[in-house]
Structure formats: C-alpha cells, structure tokens
C-alpha cells in the first residue's frame, strides 16, 4: 500500500512542478516552455520516486531474520516466530 501512495504523491508532485515551471517560464517569456516544463516534471518525478523509496522502503524489514512457521509438537501447536 505504501508503494502506491508514493507513486500517487510523485504524480501529484510532478504535475504541480510542471504547472509551476510553466508559469515561471511564461513570466520570463522564454521559448519552449512546454518542453522545459515537461522535462523538469519528469526529472522531479524520478527524483521523488527514488528518494521516497530509498527513505521509506530502505528499512522495511531486516533480511537477516528467518521465519519459523507454526508446528505441531506433542499434539500442541507451537506458534511461529522470527529468529536470527
């Protein structure tokens, strides 16, 4: 679920960045404002995705842990657990 939220926020961020860049470049009366705005928003999208995944998904789990599933010992169910 977290990954979809990151992608959604990155899309919103890139759209806002596109319109902001387009507005600023039109105020400065530059040529090719759509191309430059699109390029800036794509770069912003990629950077937002990269930093978000590195920050939020970097420590999502510890790969050193192993999972022991529940088992039946002497007719009783022993709970599963994570161990190093």
Image (cartoon, helix red, strand yellow):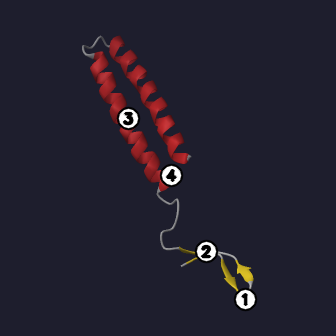
Relative to 70, 54 lies left or right? left
Disc 1 versus disc 4: distance between alpha carbons?
Answer: 43 Å
Which mark, residue 44? 3
- Tag nearer the camera, 4 or 2: 2
The Cα–Cα distance between marks 3 and 2, rounded to whole angstroms, is 43 Å
Q: CA distance from mark 4 to mark 2?
A: 28 Å
Q: In this rendered view, identify the residue nearer to me: 71 or 55.
A: 71
- Between disc 4 and disc 2, whose residue precedes? 4
Residue 69 bears which disc, if any?
A: 2
Residue 9 rendering spot, x and y as whole percentages: 50, 36
Sequence-first disc among 3 and 1: 3
Horizontal side of residue 58 vs 69, given as left or right? left
In primary-sequence order, the first of circles 3 and 2 is 3
- Which SS class for mark 4? helix
Q: Position of residue 61 (x, y in %)?
A: 52, 63
Say which element carries label 3. helix
Circle 4/circle 3 CB separation < 8 Å: no
Q: CA distance from mark 3 to mark 1?
A: 59 Å
Q: Is residue 77 left or right of residue 4?
A: right
Of mark 1 and mark 2, the one earlier in the sequence is: 2
Badge 1 is on which residue?
74
Q: Which of 53 and 26 lies nearest the eye of the viewer?
A: 53
Q: Residues within 10 Å of mark 3 (few under 14, many from 20)?
A: some
Count neighbours of disc 4 (C-alpha within 10 A) and say few if under 14, some if 14 to 19, many if 20 or more. Answer: few
Residue 56 circle label:
4
Q: Nearer the viewer, mark 1 or mark 2?
A: 1
- Residue 62: x percent and y percent? 51, 68
Q: Residue at x 72, y 79 (%)?
A: 77
Of labels 1 and 4, earlier in sequence is 4
Residue 65 in picture, x, y percent from top left: 52, 73
- Between tags 3 and 2, which lies in front? 2
């Amino acid at each position: 679920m977290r990954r979809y939220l990151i992608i959604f926020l990155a899309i919103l961020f890139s759209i806002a960045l596109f319109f902001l860049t387009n507005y600023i470049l039109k105020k400065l009366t530059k040529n090719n404002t759509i191309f430059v705005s699109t390029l800036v928003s794509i770069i912003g999208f990629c950077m937002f995705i990269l930093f978000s995944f590195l920050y939020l998904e970097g420590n999502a789990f510890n790969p050193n842990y192993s999972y022991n599933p529940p088992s039946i010992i002497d007719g009783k169910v022993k709970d599963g657990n994570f161990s190093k």
